[in-house]
Structure formats: structure tokens, C-alpha cells
């Protein structure tokens, strides 16, 4: 299909939210005298060479990116690419080796113990793969746990926990113990617990990979729904491309500790940065991800001016019927401006791939 450069396919003029988490030159090196690696000649070595010569693993290499207010920011990559380490560095569950992590402009790496505890209790929350529920506590007490640590009074924390229980669709289960619930339900409790503290940023580390595919799909829907309802900034790790495409406003692809690409789902699928990303997205149903912007051609003088109109961000699959039924080119229009035209030929080229 038509190869369009990512620059041409800059997203529409949605107002950009401010960056909440600004990560600059972040490194995490495991191994002896790790701090000598960033910025030195060692940093240029391949994974195998670094291990061989210095006995170190660079789990995160010089990562620079910003997470915007209210977005779902997906971190994707094969197992071992450094996703968990990166995200743990952001909360300092793992101490970074070098770089900056700015939360609303404040460098988390410079925070003292007390300050760090405050940030973790009030501004961040995590959802883990293996749920991390306390087995001897009832569901309601698990959800209320973060509030209890903060010193919230019993009545207040139960009220909030009950609200969260309802929000995740588990009304009535507050008195159960975690092992009385299915995996999907336990992860709903994990979600409720994270939301209970009303964090600024929610972190998810492959939260659904232990669940059956159908339950997993339900839970992805649940995250989308909750995101629409509570509008939190979410950083979501996954190795599953479908999950990344479904949930991500933007996707950051990692390989061997380094960032390979950051882009919207259609950018990652339509203009993969290298063979690694191309391989990742090779099986994707492109018509379900790419938009008309990716396949429209420039208008010609002899094109009829009275074809149907569609926006540039309509997904190809959703536009197919209109375009294929029209007896003239569909005009791709935004803000009254004609950006291009699409005909059946462009649609079929993608669908037939
Ligand atoms: N505590 C540790 N000590 C040494 N190496 C580690 C440690 N934690 C992670 N690693 C290594 O860092 C790399 C990235 O791991 P990880 O962040 O868990 O990747 P992912 O979450 O993408 O699967 C892997 O090679 C892993 O073996
Ligand atoms: Mg991991």
C-alpha cells in the first residue's frame, strides 16, 4: 500500500495535554559498578559484550519520553526488553542508575524517603500481573488497604472502598476472600484497590497476562471504560500487540532496554520504525487500525467535487462501506479543507493485503 511518511501523518489538531511524567536519559544497569556504564564507552556495547566485559546488564538504556496528562501510555516489547524495570524506575521501586524522572517538574530521583513514600501513597498506584492481594483480608479490606496506610478513618475508607467495588462491577463481594473469586474478579479487586487512593498516575504491569483470553478481553474493555470514567493517566505494560493497540493512546516500543519507537497505534502500524517493530505489527489487521489519512491521495482537478465527505481520522474499516458504495471519490475533509480523496481502489488495497 501507499507508504506515507510518519511526518505527513501527524495526528489531528487535538489539543496536547501537558506532560505529567517527563523522563530524560534514564538508565538502569544491573551489575558491578553499574554507574560507570551510562555515558561511557561501555554504553555503546551490545548486550552480550557488556555482559562479557563488565558483567552488567543494561535493562534500560538512555530512555527519554514524556507521558501526557490523561493518556493511556502503553509500553510494549518482547519479554526481557526492559519494560518492568523501566516502569519500576519511575516509582523508584528500582533505583535508576542515571537520568531524570520529573513528576510535574519535580525530580523523583531527588526525593527523600519521606517524600517518596508520600508520592507512592498519594500520587501513584500499581496493578500487578499476579494481583498482589492480601489473602487473609476480605475484598473490601484489600481495596481499602491504601487508604488505611494513609491513616483514613474506618468509615471513610469503607465508604470509598464500597464505591470502588461498585465501580468495577463487584457489588456484594466485599465480604469475600480473594481465593473465593475467579482470576478476572481478583484483578477487578486489584483495579479497585488502585483506584481507591485516587492516584494521579496508574501503573499496570502486564495485569491481564495470567487471565484466559475471553476474561482478558473483558478486562481490557473494563480498563477502557474506567479510563473514560475516571480519566486517569495510565502507564500500561504489555507484550501483547492487540492489547497495546486496543488500549494505547500512544505506544512506546522497547527492545533490549532501548526505545525503538513512540507513536499512536496507527503510526506504529503504518510506519514502523524498524524491522523489529515491523515484525511485531506484521499480522495486524491494518484496515482496523489505519485511518483514511494513511491512504488518501491528493485531489486532482478532474475529480468530481460532489462526492461524500469523511474525516481523515475515520478508520478504514469504518469507511469501507461508504467509499465502496459511492460512485465517485470520497472527499477527505477536515475543518472545511479538502485534504485528499479516497476511492475503492485505495480501500481494497489495504483490505486485500
Ligand atoms: N534484579 C535484576 N538483576 C539483574 N538483571 C535484571 C534484574 N531485573 C531485570 N534484569 C534483567 O533486565 C532485563 C530486562 O528485564 P525486565 O525489565 O524484567 O524486562 P520485561 O519486563 O520487558 O520482560 C532482562 O535481561 C532481565 O534479565
Ligand atoms: Mg516484565
Image: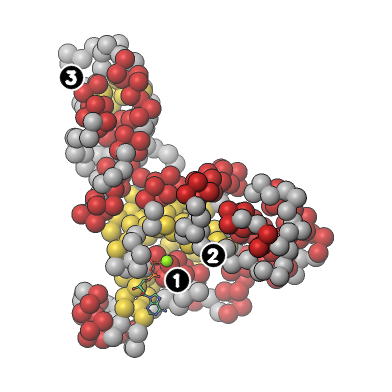
Counting residues from the N terminus, which is met first, the one under dot 3 or under dot 1?
1
Q: Of helix, strand and loop, which one carries label 1?
A: helix
Q: Of helix, strand and loop, which one carries label 2?
A: loop
Q: Which residue is mark 2?
A: 130
Q: Which label lies toward us, 2 or 1? A: 2
Which residue reaches farthest bottom? 32
Instruction: Tell me the residue at 28%/85% (across/down).
Output: 55
Q: Quadrant of ligand 2?
A: bottom left
The picture places residue 313, in percent across and down from the top left corner, at 37, 32
Residue 89's label in the rendered image is: 1
Q: On screen, 298 above or below 219?
A: above
Location of the C terminus by quadrant is top left
Residue 336 falls in image quadrant: top left
How crowded pointer 2 is (Cα within 10 Å; few <14, some 14-19, many 20+) is rated as some
Measured in 3D between alpha carbons, the distance from the residue under mark 2 to the one under mark 3, in whole angstroms, is: 57 Å
Location of the N terminus by quadrant is top left
Q: Which label lies toward us, 3 or 1? A: 1
Instruction: Tell me the residue at 35%/20% (across/down).
Output: 321
Of residue 293 and residue 269, the one placed in the foreground of this image is 269
Residue 297's label in the rendered image is: none
Q: Which label lies toward us, 2 or 3? A: 2
In the shown orientation, is residue 214 left or right of residue 166? left
Residue 22 falls in image quadrant: bottom left
Instruction: Tell me the residue at 74%/56% (across/down).
Output: 174
| Label 2 within 8 A of ligand 2 by Cβ | no
The picture places residue 349, in percent across and down from the top left corner, at 21, 29
Amino acid at each position: 500500500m501507499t507508504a506515507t511518511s510518519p511526518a505527513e501523518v501527524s495526528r489531528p489538531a487535538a489539543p496536547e495535554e501537558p506532560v505529567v511524567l517527563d523522563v530524560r536519559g534514564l538508565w538502569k544497569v544491573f551489575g558491578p559498578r553499574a554507574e560507570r556504564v551510562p555515558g561511557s564507552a561501555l554504553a555503546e556495547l551490545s548486550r552480550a559484550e557488556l555482559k562479557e566485559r563488565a558483567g552488567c546488564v543494561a535493562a534500560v538504556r538512555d530512555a527519554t519520553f514524556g507521558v501526557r496528562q490523561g493518556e493511556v501510555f502503553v509500553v510494549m516489547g518482547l519479554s526481557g526488553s526492559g519494560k518492568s524495570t523501566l516502569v519500576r524506575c519511575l516509582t523508584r521501586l528500582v533505583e535508576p542508575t542515571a537520568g531524570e524522572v520529573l513528576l510535574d517538574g519535580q525530580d523523583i530521583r531527588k526525593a527523600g524517603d519521606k517524600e517518596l513514600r508520600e508520592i507512592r501513597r498519594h500520587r501513584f498506584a500499581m496493578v500487578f500481573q499476579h494481583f498482589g492481594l492480601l489473602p487473609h483480608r476480605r475484598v473490601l479490606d484489600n481495596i481499602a488497604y491504601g487508604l488505611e496506610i494513609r491513616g483514613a478513618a474506618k468509615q471513610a475508607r469503607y465508604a470509598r472502598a464500597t464505591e470502588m467495588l461498585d465501580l468495577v462491577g463487584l457489588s456484594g463481594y466485599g465480604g469475600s476472600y480473594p481465593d473465593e473469586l475467579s482470576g478476572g474478579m481478583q484483578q477487578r479487586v486489584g483495579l479497585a484497590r488502585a483506584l481507591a487512593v485516587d492516584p494521579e498516575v496508574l501503573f499496570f504491569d502486564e495485569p491481564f497476562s495470567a487471565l484466559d483470553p475471553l476474561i482478558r478481553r473483558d478486562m481490557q474493555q473494563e480498563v477502557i471504560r474506567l479510563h473514560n470514567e475516571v480519566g486517569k493517566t495510565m502507564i500500561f505494560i504489555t507484550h501483547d500487540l492487540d492489547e497495546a493497540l486496543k488500549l494505547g493512546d500512544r505506544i512506546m516500543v522497547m527492545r533490549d532496554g532501548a526505545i525503538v519507537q513512540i507513536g499512536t497505534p496507527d503510526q506504529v502500524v503504518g510506519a514502523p520504525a524498524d524491522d523489529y517493530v515491523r515484525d511485531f505489527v506484521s499480522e495486524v489487521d491494518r484496515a482496523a487500525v489505519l485511518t483514511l489519512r494513511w491512504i488518501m491521495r491528493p485531489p486532482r482537478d478532474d475529480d468530481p467535487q460532489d462526492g461524500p465527505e469523511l474525516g481523515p481520522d475515520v478508520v478504514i474499516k469504518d469507511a469501507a462501506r461508504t467509499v465502496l458504495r459511492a460512485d465517485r471519490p470520497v472527499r477527505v475533509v477536515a475543518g472545511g479543507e479538502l485534504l485528499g480523496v479516497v476511492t475503492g481502489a485505495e480501500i481494497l488495497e489495504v483490505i486485500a493485503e
